[in-house]
Image (cartoon, helix red, strand yellow):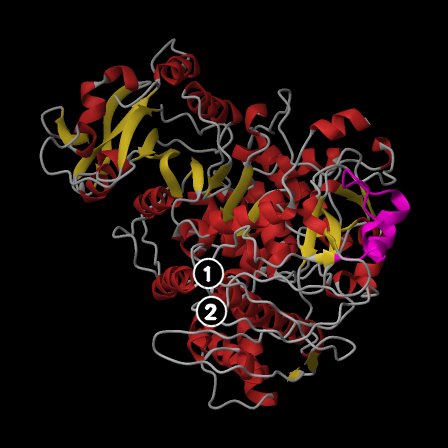
Amino acid sequence: MNEETRKKKKRPSLTTLYEGTMKEITSNENRYIEFLNFASRVHKYSFDEQLLLYAQKQDVHMVATFDIWKKLGRFVKRGSTAALLFDYTTQQRKYVFDISETGGEPLQVFDWQLLDNDKNDLLRYWNTYEKQSGTLVNWEDGIHAKIASYQKPIGDQIHPFFVKDIEVVAAYIIYQRTNTLIPEDLLLDVQSVLQIGKRDNTLLEIQHFANLTAKEFLQDVERILNNELKKERVLYHDRIKFEDELSRREWQPASRDRNVRRNDADWKDREADPIEMGERKIASSDEMEVKRKLSSGSETNGNSSARQDQPVLRETRDERKLTDRDGTISESEASEIASDASRGDHSEPTIVEEVKESERSGSFFMPVSERGEQVDLFAEETNYMEDPEISYLEDNEEESVENFRFADTFTFPSGPKAKFQANIAAIRLLHRLETENRFANSEERNILAQYSGWGGLADAFDENKLAFQKEYLELKELLTPEEYQAAFEGTLTTYYTEPALIDRMYQVLQGLNVEPEKILEPSMGIGHFFGRLPKAYQTASLTGVEIDKLSGRIAKKLYPKAAIQLKGFEEMNSQSNTFDIAIGNIPFNDFNVTDKSKRYPHKLIHDYFFEKSLDLVKPGGYILFVTSKGTMDKKDSRARHYLAQRADLISAVRLPNTAFSGLGGTKATTDILLLQKLEKERFVVEDIPEWVQTTGFQDSQGRINTYFYNHPEKVLGELKLSGMYGGQKVIECVPKANQDWLVELDKWAVSCKGPY
């Protein structure tokens, strides 16, 4: 990028960015929760840095400076853009890049998806080696007890009325980071903290201490599991353990002395001493004093504003010379800044306590440096997202780590034996990649992508089937008992989706001009829906959930840039109104789901997937699922009634029972349903939509959804009675002679233009 182009690309100052982002995340509860979810992923950074990173790059998993990536054996890819962070406490600025913008050596990382065994080990350690007021019985008790212990040493710095608020926010970050189901009452408490913090102009203070508390807790968890307990933990490449590299200095929050006046209490000025937190000393490295100006005024509701009396962050001439006029830095300067940050070599400003009385103090603050010539750092328009002029390796020196995409020429094996061998090859490769702790190359990804589950391969799990004795023994040798049991159960429940079917589903969304930023696949298998993502959707943030650990681990290797959770959908922690679309092939089976949150009334698995997914998508967002015909045809209409109160059915189509006979190895009548979430819930009392109701079929021998009964053009086959289920004959959709159902599906996709 030439100099002229750089000058044209004006960016807001960091102050403007900071204030605007603070205003955005506090605008409503959902925005605030979304930020806390983000903060949990980058918990080792200060709140100031988290806020600026959130403003510039929300879809990150781990970030570090150019120099740190280099020390870790990785390079920053050509064309990558940096995010500029600034820590107001230490007055350090740094340019950081996400791991997705780097290539090179694979990294060992700490897996934050804590299992029940991990949590039990931590409880045992705390009960055995650390003094507790009582025995910690469960993980949730442990979280809150440890938070309280971390807060004791900083009690003199915190207004008593802040303590509970800090605990709530810290607990939420910890719950989210450690794979713990977030209770409904904690969500309500977080929302209350936001409202009170905005009212009393104290949210920044609460957030700062909550971040420090959560960071301390999570560092202890990592230390105990990795060192004291000497556990062998599974390490994944998409989460990095960089505690030492990112910050060689001890945790050093500046003393947050403040004068806070509330209607119900007087809070006297206090002089803080350096504090001991565990084995860490909470003070600056040189026992510096603290200077903090608390700006007065409450018009901002907790958000800073550019007032005349607002203190600004200053820097010396020596610091400023590292930055060019346009905010870019040279290779040597980038290395200098990064290495200084990692070593903690920046001499920190001397800070002295200074509290300004006002009706509402304790609002936004920035420390002021008094060494050297003082310059307003944020007066210049810093191009913080420009490319720092650093030395990138050539593109061909390392294969880019991108998400897998099925080529149009990709083929799956046909026949049970070939399918079995492809699965075995994929599993063996997965084990090797995990042992070597590395990414899969292009050739290896094609091998992994041929894994198609165990649907239709029940014979391979039967030791009495002579034709599959070799395969049976191979499975027993290759899989752990847990993996074997999950695979066996998958012979009846796991049916992977044909790419041709997926393409038509995306065609529907594109025909509706849907441009998603966040996509959810709640039962992803190995991620076929991610693998067929249209080019127009390539920049979307992807989140996948998979209960089968083997399939999910393969998915992680295929889609390193996606956020993939290896758990049941009922255990997924996410907030309402988060995703633009939810898409996928949800489980076919007749069993109930247990969700501790008790937020969704219907537990039958396909009903549950619809109800929770509808909650997770934004108003106006879409759900596009392949589901068993029972969703629409079952006589009990309560689940459909629940959905109709919250969504419109845009369209539906019934597939022939051979749609999954190729890749899935089974015959099953299925539907594709497209729902759009309403802006506001309605009560369906009169004029019940026809898709909520069922109608008798062939003299009421069976029942079919009224929508399909009235719209035979939406049925891609011939409806026939076959067998019995629940006291009624089952209605199957069988292929019509001389009809290409994919051609008919194309016609349906084109017809989806809005609520029918």
Q: Amino acid at mark 1?
A: Gly
Rendered view: 299 above or below 345? above
In the rendered view of the protein, which quadrant contains the N terminus?
top right
Left or right: 614 with respect to 99? left
Mark 2 residue crowding within 10 angstroms, few (<14) / some (14–19) / many (20+): some
| Residue 317 magenta | yes
Residue located 47% across and 25% down the image:
506
Left or right: 394 with respect to 640? right
Residue located 85% across and 38% down the image:
392
Q: Earlier in the sequence, mark 1 or mark 2?
A: 1
Q: Amino acid at mark 2?
A: Ser
386 or 655: which is nearer to us? 386
Residue labelled with disc 1: 297
For residue 224, what is the image quadrant?
bottom right
Left or right: 230 with respect to 360? right
Provide the secondary structure element on which disc 2 rests: loop
555 or 191: which is nearer to us? 191
Residue 725 image offset from top left, x and y in percent: 22, 40
In the rendered view of the protein, which quadrant contains the C terminus?
top left
| Residue 45 magenta | no
730 or 187: which is nearer to us? 187
For residue 522, what is the image quadrant?
top left
View extreme (top): residue? 738
Q: Are marks 1 and 2 in contact (CB under 8 Å)?
A: yes
Residue 462 image offset from top left, x and y in percent: 51, 49
Instruction: Work out whether residue 670 can be spotted.
Output: no
- Residue 16 shows which numbered tag? none
Segment tinted magenta in the rendering:
315-339
Provide the secondary structure element on which disc 1 rests: loop
Residue labelled with disc 2: 358
